[in-house]
Amino acid sequence: MNSAVCENGSWTPETEEDKEMVRQQMNRLLGTSHFKNSRRYPLLFRFIVEETLEGRGEFLKERLLGVRVFDRPADYDTATDPIVRVTIAEIRKRIAQYYHEEAHDAEMRIELLPGHYIPEFHLSRDAGFDYRHASSPVSRWVEKQTVESESILPPAQPVAASRKTFAGRLIHSPAFRYVLVALTVLLIAVAAGAVWKWSQKSAVEELWGSFLTSRSTVIFCLPVGTRPGEGTASAAGIIVHDQAFARVPLQNASSSDSSLPGTFLAHEALGENVVFSDTLAALRISNYLAVHNRASNFRPNTVTTLDDLRQGPVVLLGGLDNQWTLRALASWRYRFAGTDSEQYWIVDAKQPAMTNWSLDLKVPLSNVKRDFAIIARIHDESTGQVEMIVAGIGMSGTAAAGEFLVDPQHMEALRRRVGAGFRSRDFEAVLSTDVVDGIAGSPVILAVEVR
C-alpha cells in the first residue's frame, strides 16, 4: 500500500490497488439508505471520487459539475441554479450521517470538506497505515522537541532513555497540559459549530418545507384568458364591482356565428394565454422545487376544480384574475379589491378606508412607479393541503412576489417578521416593489399577518 500522506492526514492513493480500495468504500456508502434512494446524490458523489482518483480533482468546479453531471448548458447561471451546491451539501450531510454510526468507525473515511468539491481519503487504523505521518500538531511538536534535545544529551546517556525522560517531563509539564486543553476546547467548538450549522434549515427551506416533504406533485394554478366572471369573485365577497368588471362566461361567449362555443375560433379568441409575469414567477418557484426533487403540474384556473386542489400542495398565481386566490384570501386581513374602470388595490380589513396600496388604471404604463403584491401560506381545511399564494395587483407585483419567495435574504427578513413557528404557521404579507417601464425591482415587506 502506498503511503502518500498530506500534512492534514489525508491519504493520496497512487496504486491501482489503493484506488480500488477507495472505490470499494465509495460503493459501500452508496449501497446504504443514505444514498441508494436518490439518483442525484450517487451520480455526483461517484463522479467527484473517480475524477479525484484519476488526478483531475483540481478541475472540480461548480460549473464543470453542473455541465458534466447535470447536463446544464455551458453558460448556465450558477447563481440562479444552485443544483451543484445543494447536492454537494446533501452528500456531505449523508457522509457525516454514515460515519456517525459506530459500526463504521474502523472503515476508511471519504470526506467532503465545506467549500470544497474535492473529496479527501483517510485510511483506517486497521489498514496498516503508519499514523505517525498523520499525527496531531501537539504530537509533532513533542517529537520535534524530543529530537532537538538529543543534541544536548550527555555522551554517556543512551539516546532512547534520554528521549523517554524528556518526553515524560514534557507530557507532565503545565505548558503541555494547557496546550492540550486549549486544542481540545477548540476542536469541540469547531465540531459543535459544524453540527449546529448542519442542523439549521435556511428560511427558504422552512418556508417550502411542507412542499418539499410531500410526496404529491405540486400543483401550479395559473390564471389564463379573461377573469372568471363576476359571480365567483362576488361569492368571495371581495371585489367592489362596476359594470365594466363583468365578463362574458367562457362557455357562453360568442361574438359571431363563427365563434360558437367549443369552436377553434372561440378558443383562440378567449384564449388560454398565460401572462409573462405569472410564467416567470411560476418558473422561479418550480425550478427551486425541481432542485429538491419535487415535481410540478401546471393547470389553468379556468378548469381547476376543488378536487384538483385536494391532490397535493398548491401554488396559486395571480390575484384579481384567479378565483382560487380570491377564495383563499376571503377571510384574511389583506385582500384584493377594485374596479376595472378606476383602480385596483389591496384592502386592509382593519383599515378599510385606506387605499395606499393601489394602482390607477388610467395612468400610462411609463408613469407606474410602484406595484404591490400579497404572498401567503395557508393550510386550507377544505382541501387538506397547503397553499402558497403569489399574487400582485399588476404584472410587476406577481413577478416580484415570485422572486421574493425563493430569495434567501428576503426569506430571512420574512422569518424575522413572522417570528416563532415560521416553519408551520399560516401567514400573509403585503409586498411593495419599485417599477421602471413595467419591470419590477427588489421587493420589500410592508405588512405581515400571522395566524
Image (cartoon, helix red, strand yellow):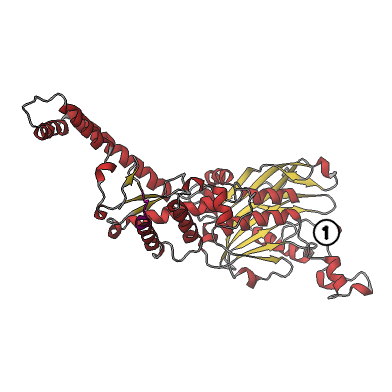
Quarter of the image holding residue 134?
A: top left
User: Residue shown at 89%/71% (left/top)?
Assistant: 254
Q: Residue 56 in the image: x percent, y percent?
A: 48, 49
Report which residue position mark 1 lands on: 245
As displayed, is residue 210 above or below residue 433? below
Looking at numbered disc 1 in the image, what kind of residue is underneath it? Phe
User: Residue shown at 43%/62% (left/top)?
Assistant: 35
Q: Residue 427 in the image: x percent, y percent?
A: 57, 53
Element assignment for label 1: helix
Answer few, some or many: residues within 10 Å of disc 1's Cα (few below 14, many 20 plus, some between 14 and 19).
some
In magenta, the rendered stretch is: 12-18
Q: Is residue 404 visible?
A: yes
Residue 236: in magenta span: no
Of residues 370 and 441, the one nearer the viewer is 441
As displayed, is residue 184 above or below residue 278? above
Q: In the orientation shown, which residue stands out farthest toward the front?
A: 15
Q: Is residue 262 found left or right of 296 in the rendered image?
A: right
Q: Is residue 394 visible?
A: no
- Quarter in which the C terminus is drawn: bottom right
Q: Residue 211 in the image: x percent, y percent?
A: 55, 60
User: Residue shown at 54%/48% (left/top)?
Assistant: 62
Quarter of the image holding residue 307?
A: bottom right
